Structure formats: C-alpha cells, structure tokens
Image (cartoon, rainbow, N blue to C red):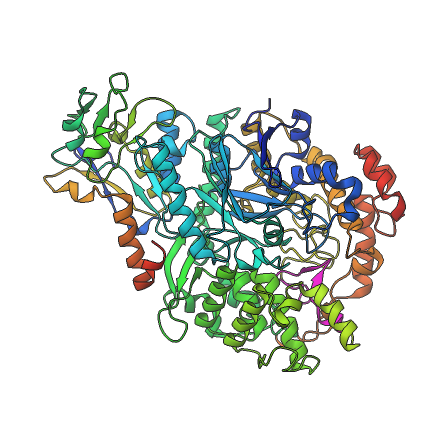
Amino acid sequence: MILGYAGRFLEVDLLTEKIKEVKFDDEILEDYIGGRGLAAKILWDRLGRKWEEIDPLEPENVLLFLTGPLTGYFPGGRICVSGKSPQSNGMVGSTVGGEFGVELRCAGYDGIIVTGEAEKPVYLSVKDSDIEIRDASHVWGRDAKQTVKILNNECRELLKKRFSLYGEWKEPSILYVGPAGENKVRTAVVAAKWAHAAGYGGYGAVMGSKKLKAVAVKGTGPLPPVANIKEVKKLIRVVDDDAYENELWRRWGTGSGGYEVGAKTSSEPVRNWQDEWHDERSFGVDQFENRVWIKQFWSDFGCPTCCLKIAMVKTGKFKGAITDNPDYEMQAYLGPNLGIFTPEENVFLSSLIDDLGLCGIQTGNVMGFAAELFQRGILTKKDVDGIELKWGDAEAFAALARKIAFKEGIGDLLAEGVYRVALKIQEQKKVNVLKYAVQSKGIGIGAHGIRSEKDYPEKISYVCSVQGGDHTSTTGLPLDGSGSELGEIFNDSGVYCNFNSFGVPRKVKFDFYKAVTGIELTSEDWYTSKALKILQLQRAMLLLGGPDLKWNPKIHDANPPRFYEPLPSGPYKGKTADKAKVEEEKERYYEAVGWDENGIPQSEILRKLGLRDVDKKLEKLR
Amino acid sequence: MTTKKEPIWIARDLSKCSGCRKCEIACSLFHEKRIWPEASRIRVFMLVPGTDFPHFCAQCENYPCVKACPVKALSISKKTGAVLVKANLCTACGKCIDACPGRIPHMHPTKKHILICDLCHGKPQCVKVCQEGEWNVLKRISRGNRPYELYARTPREITRDLAFKMYGEKAEEFL
C-alpha cells in the first residue's frame, strides 16, 4: 500500500442505504493521486460509457468527496467535491477549505462516493467506522447557519451518549447544502463553516438532487502514516515560512483585490463586465478592515496564511449580516459587478448568499447578466416580478437571490445559471443575449478579466480550461508553466490549498508528495504524463457533455464576446482581447496537449497515455 | 523563552485564536510522533464558526483532577507544575474529567488512558508554533500565585462568551 493514504474509501448508496468500503489499486492512486485526478478516473470508469445520457441531477450521477495524500500535511486543508457537473456537463474538481478532509482521513477514509438518491432528506454521519444515514427532515429548508448549528449540536449529543467517558467532544466537520442546493439550483454550492464553499461545478445541486442535506464527520485516529515524517515537518516549515512573509495576504486576504484588481490591473467585473475598471476608494480593503471585520485572521486546518476574515455589519439596515471576509471574488461579484460599492451592502449580500447556499460567483454573474438585460430594456420590470433591477440596489439583488434559491418566478429561470438562462431568453425574446453572458462552457468566469493583460489570466485561460470559467483552474502555455492548469491539477489532486503553494518552488510540492507517499514524482512525470492524462479525461467528459448541452470546441472554445469589446474607461481604456491572437494561441495549445484542429483529443496521445477506451469513445466526435 | 523561571504557565488570549490548529499538530507530533488532532493535549474547539479557541489544562492551584484520581495515576510535576499522567496506572474511569471545572481532560482515542497537557517538560510546543505564526494566543510565563482555575472553563462556556464578544445579540441564534 502507498503511504499517506488511509487506504479505504466509503461508498454509500442512498437508495438502498447500502454502505461499503472500496479500495483502489496502488497503480491507480499513483497515477491519479486523489481529489480531482482520482475523481476523473472514478467518474470515467463508472459513467464514461454512457456519459452523454447521464443527467447530472438524476440519481445515476455519482457524487464524490475526495481527499488526497497531502490533505492535512500540506498546510491548508481542503476537500475536493466532484461528479458530473450540472453547469458544464463535464467534470469539475471543486475544492473547499476546512477540516472535513482531515476529519475524514482521521476517520480512516480517503474519500466518500455517494450514489443513488434518498427517498427523503438525509444526512450522512461518519464517526470513524460507524457510518449512519440519518433523517434530515428537521434541517431540510434551513439556511446555512441554522443547519450548522442543529447538526453540530445533534452530532455532539450523539457522540456524548455513545462515548460518555471520552470527555468533551469537539465539533464534527460538516459539509452541507442550503435551500438552493435542495432546490437543485445550478449555482448552488457544497459549503462548510457557514461561508466556505465548493462553488464551481454546481455540486450543491447534485447533493440536493440526492436529498443529501449534509455529511458530518468525526475521525479520532491519526492522519495516515507517511514515508518520512522528519522531511514532512521540514517542508511544512518551508511552506509556513513563505506564508509568514506574505504580510499583505495574511493581513487582508484576497480582499486586497477589491481595490487593486479594479483600480490597478483593471480586470474586475463592473456591471456585468461592461467595464473592468473602477477606483472607488470606498471599496478598498482598508474600508472593510476596521469597519466590518470582527475576526481578522481565520484559518482552516494547518493554514499559516489565514486569508479568511469574519465580517459583520454593525450599523444601518443590514446590521447583523455575517460572512467570511468577503474575499476578493465575493467583493467583486457581489460588489462592482452589481454596481455596489459599499462594504456594508457587500457583506450583506455575501451573507445572504451563504445562508441560501448559493455560489457568490455564479449567482453574482447571472444576477449581473439579468441587470444588464434590464438596463437594456430586454427584461422588463414585469419579467423580473416587479423588481426594479437597478445597478447598486443591494435590496433588489437580495430579493432576486432569494427568488433564485427558491426558484420562484424569475428565479426559476435564473436558477439555471447564466448560459442556460441566456439560451432561454434568446429563444423567448428573439434577441441575441448570449453576447452578454460572461461565461465559458456553462461556468461563469471568475472575477479576473483578460482585456487589460495586467492580471494573471491570459488569452486562452478560460477558452481551453477543462473547468470552463473557473478562475482557480485557468490554462495556457507552456504546459509546464505557472499559467497552465496542469499545476493546478496537482494542487487539487493532492488536495490542499493552492494559496499556500503560490510562493514556494514547484519542487517543494513534489518533494512534499515524496515525503508523504514515498514515491518519487518528477516534473516530467507530472507534466508530460500524469497531469496530461487527467486533463484528457476531463476534456473527454466535457466534450461528451449531454444530455441537455453539448460543447462544440469550434464554437465554445472561446472567450465570452464581451472580452472583445474595448474597455470603456480607466488606464487601459480601449484595450481588448485580440481574436486572431487568441485563435493562434488556441491552436498552439491544442497541439501541445495533443488535440486535433477541432479540439478533440487525438488517438495518438490518448493511446500513449493508456486511455484506449477514451479514444474509442471519442471516435464519434471526430 | 528559556529564561522564564519554573514552574511555568501558559498564558492564553483565546479571542486571538485563528483556528489554524498548528498547536494540535505540534502537540501530537511531539507526544505521538504523528499528526493526530484528537490525541493532542491541546484541542481547538469551534462549536460556532469563528469562535475557535484552544482548550487545555490550566493547572488549577488546587489540582482537583489529581485529588479526584482514585488510583493515583495523576501527579504534579515539581519542576514545571504540570499534571503528569501515569498511563499504566490510569484506568480511564473519567473521574478527573468530572472533577475538572473546565472538563478539560479527555481520553486518548485508542489507548485506555487520559490525556492532560504536560507542558512538554517545560518547553511547550504549542506556544512555539503559536508564536511563530505571530498569533500570540499562547505565551509561556512563570507560574505565580494566581487563581488559575478561572481559566478552567468548559468549551460551552468559552464558546458562549466568544460568540457574544463577536456576534453580540446575534450569538443566541448560533449557540
């Protein structure tokens, strides 16, 4: 057995309520590591044959919660959530911070595989090897904060009853969905700790479709044994020391982007990306720091950075709203993207989004889209249930968010996520509205634009990513460079926080992997073989798509049309993405990853990587 | 740090805790040679999100846990002032937990004995990592003649206070 793994995965079928343990061969773990990589393998093996027919929101879909060998060791614990995505119809490795991954590994499992659909709402309770499917009807419909409270108290009571001599029980770690997930809203998240979320992919809707309200885990064992604990300690030190030097991120978190990305790099969504520049000092992180932050440093397991903060509105009509931070993405998407420029309104909307179990990025994106259509008169007040959907009106957007989470009125339409909404409105109104949808492959683009060329994403970052608009998995050339998603695949497969790895040399990550597993991993192994294999699997599933949507790379490997409109203001006024250059870069990328001129992975590369069945399956697309 | 006179005490400023749990990591690596949060002698509780705090022995001046032990498995270190557990004598009866005003001791998750902070023979590993990260929740100081039992409070009591400190009247909704 490879070191660093618990060696067992839990498989739970919610229909039959059968629970079993499954194991994977060492070769599989060695090739696919864990998290995102292993998710690609599991999903392909289980669903690949009939991928196009699987409705992500039907019981056939498989929902995965996977750790990796580095979870708990590499500073900054996370867990990877995956399955067939109801946003892209491909597969997304969506990670969320917290203690869940560590608790799970301490319980003796590397991951949980959930199949089927429960008859009534349930939650899964894991205490070491005691696994129970429990009734969740009392928390169904509850918001994030109430769900956490009720399940936390309930699980601790149970532990106390069963192990009365243990002493005081700490809280279990809980992943849950809010009302949006229950209602199968495609922009729903799988969440933790009130406000942490696995957003990209829309797996909250998958959990909801399975009537799985939550998973609560308490593990009392140690993390799995490693090959060289001395070396692990040394490497933790290296990562920590690097983080401790990064004063800006520790102090302000990504929130520092709220001003910087707008004013300096001019790449922040403003009013549904009609602009990417603002220099509103009212939205600087310094305005949040003392005004709304009540806890300035909030960590997940082992994290030296503490990019998270807790914010609470202290005065005015939004008094009492609480959220973590908000971080840059929430600041942008629930701020300038909706024409909002005050910390209080931003915290209020972020808090509401948490409570409803919505994704701030995807929901902020689709709400911005709707507001732009309102601005242009394409959507009327009647269309949006009488809401005056004006830029900057936090209460109007709050009303809209509630409608989305509960699929009421216009919310029922917007709950489909920006791409599907655009298609529907286009059909109803006979107007081209797709050009206002800022997304890639059904996934709204993260709050980092490409037009100014001053931020990290580049020409094809969102065009060719196998995770669409995911700003944490952008891609580009060279394949072994920091701009390609192959590096991100390692973070998401080892399953730890990429924020703690930005500043350390790549070698440290591979050394870390070796110190934990005992297996040597070279850059060449990773970038020319293992990561590439995971990428091809993800690409194959993305292109197979279905049943409601299919992607044609010729059309859909593209930037949103908005990125070709010149920036209307700011220091980079007039700048725009260059279509010819994007196409040229895309061709180079296709060649580098072994895709043909139509963007389909070629036989040669697939066979070289040992993916014969993928090759066969893709024949019909060629 | 080494200049502090023994016996020592770990001063604690709970509301500064980030919840990074590096203290649990350091403690379990020192005592168990593994990363093992539940076997750590210092445990970070987060019963309400945001109210993270470390829970560990306060070395009350009257040591009620030591008195409550029916088999003399607990003793007081003359050097550091820590409560020492003789694992081979401990019967895991849990009487020390009930005697502790903060219900701080807890069982080793796999072995049949209680876990209580032993101050790492005078060089507490939790303090080291907490200070490295500049959280400064924990600080090693000399032990004086002070009412240390005031620090021995249950997780529920501490959580309640921290929740009120952070969330004001909203706290009631989360407890």
Left or right: A111 in relation to A274: left
Q: Is residue A43 above or below residue A382?
A: above
Residue nearest the observer in this picture, A283 or A126: A126
Residue A311 horizontal/vertical position (percent): 41, 62
Is residue A587 at all visible to an observer of this figure?
Answer: yes
Q: Residue at x 59, y 24 (%)?
A: A2
Q: Is residue A270 above or below residue A494?
A: below
Magenta region, residue range:
A433-454
Which corner quadrant holds the N terminus of chain A? top right
Q: Residue at x 81, y 39 (%)?
A: A614
Q: Main secondary structure of the magenta part?
A: loop
Is residue A268 at all visible to an observer of this figure?
Answer: no
Residue nearest the observer in this picture, A272 or A246: A272
Q: Quadrant of residue B153?
A: top left
Residue nearest the observer in this picture, B47 or A161: A161
Left or right: A314 in relation to A6: left
